[in-house]
Image (spheres, rainbow, N blue to C red):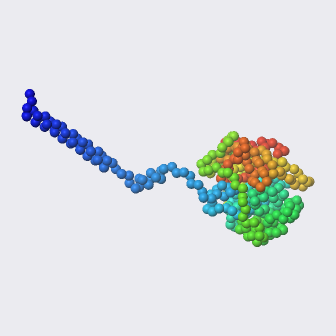
Amino acid sequence: MSGPISQRNYWLRVMASALLCMIMVSCSAMSSTGESESVPQPTQQETEKKALEQPKEPAVPAFTAPLTGLPVEKPVVERPLAIMINNAPAARPQAGLSQADMVYEVLAEGGITRLVAFFQSHGGDVKIGPVRSIRPYLIELGETYGALPIHAGGSTDAYAILQQQRKEHLDEISNGGAYFWRSKDRRPPHNLYTDVSRLRQGSESKGYIRQTEVPVYPYLKTGETPVMVDESAASVHIRFLLKSYRVSYTYDPVNQRYKRFVNEKTHLDQNNNQQLSAANVIVMSTRHQTLDDVGRLSVELDDSGEAMVFQQGKLIRAEWQHTSGDAIRFMKNGVEIPLTPGTSYIHVVPADTPLAEHVTFEAN
């Protein structure tokens, strides 16, 4: 039965339902707003801490030294100095080698070896030496990196090259005595020293080239590990000819350097009593020829041959290549091997004996 009362009741129910829906929607909105406002906001300290915890990309240095790949504050454009360093037992420990950018160890005569230390990114008045004589292939080695040869005397053939080709050089005996000095704690010829500041002064006084373009090696980035690895090598032993020139290295994983020993004794820098170390230990095999009864040699550096590259406790079996106007390169399957940033020690051994007989190594 329908009537005015029924219709009124119907509309009351509709209005009550609508009002109830509005109340529920309003409460839901208020509840949502309240929950949003109750979420605690991070403090400035928490925000800064979170930002510090975020992984960061390794910073790329603005400048790197050409012969080490290490970061430097400004471009390194000075001409390298190739200093002939005496390596006779009476000359050890030598001074200044811990600041060399690169060191070559090469046979001289009679089975002795000579060190050719390249200085470019380090300067100042740090004592370097003892300085010794030069050979033709050591002149060539210095020129490979655009370096100024520094020496005290030389073989007849070396002097002929320097004089006849009018090559720039500083020789304590013939044209640079003022830029060297002799110490009183050792006997000649094991007591002749110099420093980078004096050599730069000597070069400038003679009008020599001050800056040169130096060949650059590829280097591993921070955190990168060697590629094309063949074996692990935590210790390395290198034999030249004489028993008094046995070189070895032990890898230190903390600083990723090979620590150097000579005849199983720690090889130190006389200046700071620091053990010499290398980021890269390289051995390259080349043809050697004896020229006279004294045992003077010719060493073939303008060619290619077998090599071993040790870095970060690993061995890479490689090949060395050298073309005119470029540095000696170290390759694997036609690709140049990136070096670990730091000082490299490169050892040149005769090819008449297999490289495996000159070099032995252990994994640990």
The answer to whether residue 336 of the structure is visible from this angle is yes
Q: What residue is rendered at 62% in x and 50% in y?
A: 221
67 or 282, nearer to the observer: 67
| Residue 10 point in image, percent of width and height | 13, 34
For the C terminus, the image quarter is top right
214 or 99, nearer to the observer: 214
| Residue 225 point in image, percent of width and height | 63, 46
The quadrant where residue 94 appears: bottom right
Horizontal relation, residue 93 to residue 161: left or right: left
Q: What residue is rendered at 80% in x and 65% in y?
A: 168
Q: What residue is rendered at 75% in x and 45% in y?
A: 319
Q: Which residue ends up furthest to the top in the rendered image?
A: 1
For the N terminus, the image quarter is top left
42 or 62, nearer to the observer: 62
The answer to whether residue 243 of the structure is visible from this angle is no
Q: Number of callouts in the render? A: 0
Horizontal relation, residue 71 to residue 358: left or right: left
| Residue 177 point in image, percent of width and height | 80, 69
Horizontal relation, residue 350 to residue 12: left or right: right
Q: What residue is rendered at 64% in x and 57% in y?
A: 64
Q: Which residue ends up furthest to the front in the rendered image?
A: 3
| Residue 32 point in image, percent of width and height | 29, 45
The quadrant where residue 104 appears: bottom right
The quadrant where residue 121 appears: bottom right
